[in-house]
Amino acid sequence: MKIQTVILTLTLSILALKSQNDQHMTTAVRTEGSLPSLRSAFRCVSDLDGKTYNKGQIKNCLDSIAALPYVQSVNPESNNLPNGNVFVEFVVQAKELGVQELTFGVPLDDEKPIRHWIAKNPNNLRIGGVYTANAETSTFQGIRQFYAAKGTLVGIVPTVRLNYNKGDAQIRFDIVEGPHVSPKPVYYPYAPTCDDEVHYLDWSQVDQFVPVPLMESLIKLRALGACFAPEQIKTDEKALADSGLFKKAAVTYSGPRGERRVALNVQGRTIRVRKIAVAYYGSNEHCETTDIEPELALKAGDTYTRPRAELSIEYIEKACSMPGQWIEVIESDERADDLDLKVTFNVLRFPLQSVFIDGKKVE
């Protein structure tokens, strides 16, 4: 009887160990106080995501975060998930820093409007408020929306100075202006709420011969969140038909108020590319001296196809990328005579954010 009890206990222990070893982790970070928006600071947390549950690895991660000079405390919170895995949240706390300075490196005419714009969202950074990484991200997105509504793509370069010794923070957002784009809708809280938004766009029936940037410039219901109006469907359909660029152009909608689905069925004509151009914005010094155009998949004289345009964008991104820089390449199309097309690939490159902690730059 005693031997059977020992065997049963041993079997249950092995099964429990096997069950624990089969568990995988889903990991996350919850921050409290003023922590910098540095992915490198909490990289060990993302590295653990999806791995087998291991207390030793969790402890090693806790120790590496606790060693950061600005971290006051870090604690794990674990919960079992319905799928049998374990959710491990690292709760990281730091001292709260008041925003002492908030500046914008923007054209003079934009200074006052952008401050007024940013003040509309209570989640954004503000003088006298507490600096958080979430507030920085919200402000970043607010600036992007400000320029997107004006029809300008911009690079945003934050410089964040967190002074834990003094208890304050200074943040600056420098703007690198890029190319003109089709203006985007303005969303709440920067505009009144719309109770009948476009919730889904179906462009699966837009064929490869359609130059999408040119198509977008002709219609109003071109983005999620756009305020829906039934009469705009016919207006957009007519604008596409009147352009003469498409064999077929149908715009339809479905869904109840507040859940509108807009579908485009557009077939392009054979359009010849008359000219290819590459335009540079921001810091593209080494790329501007390179003769990129002959290497692109889409060339002057070709019939326009979107797959070739996309391959050209991928090539430029690889050719012009540099460490410590963010790059965006977008296509713009201009109709020449008849059905000819001028295609421009706009290259916007700018530095990533800089973070200084107590006067020392942190990577």
Image: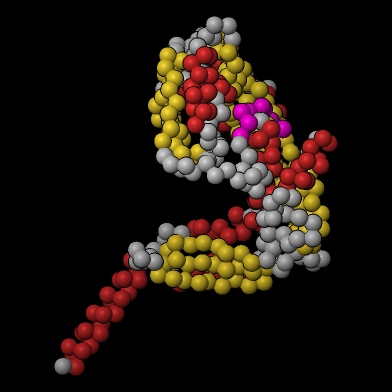
Residue placed most toward the observer, 50 or 183:
183
Residue 349 visible? The answer is: no
Residue at (67%, 72%) from the top-left corner?
72
Q: Is residue 180 magenta?
A: yes
Residue placed most toward the observer, 151 or 169:
151
Q: Quick one: which residue is furthest to the left in this view?
A: 1
* The residue stretch that appears in magenta: 177-184
In the rendered image of this protein, does residue 266 appear above or below residue 203?
above
| x then y, percent, for residue 148 | 65, 35
Q: Is residue 43 magenta?
A: no
| x then y, percent, for residue 322 | 63, 36
**Left or right side of 162 for 203:** left
In the rendered image of this protein, does residue 9 appear above or below residue 40?
below
Residue at (46%, 59%) from the top-left corner?
49
Residue at (82%, 66%) from the top-left corner?
166
Residue at (61%, 67%) from the top-left corner?
92
**Left or right side of 269 for 321:** right
| x then y, percent, for residue 133 | 66, 56
Residue 31 visible? The answer is: yes
In the rendered image of this protein, does residue 135 appear above or below residue 281?
below
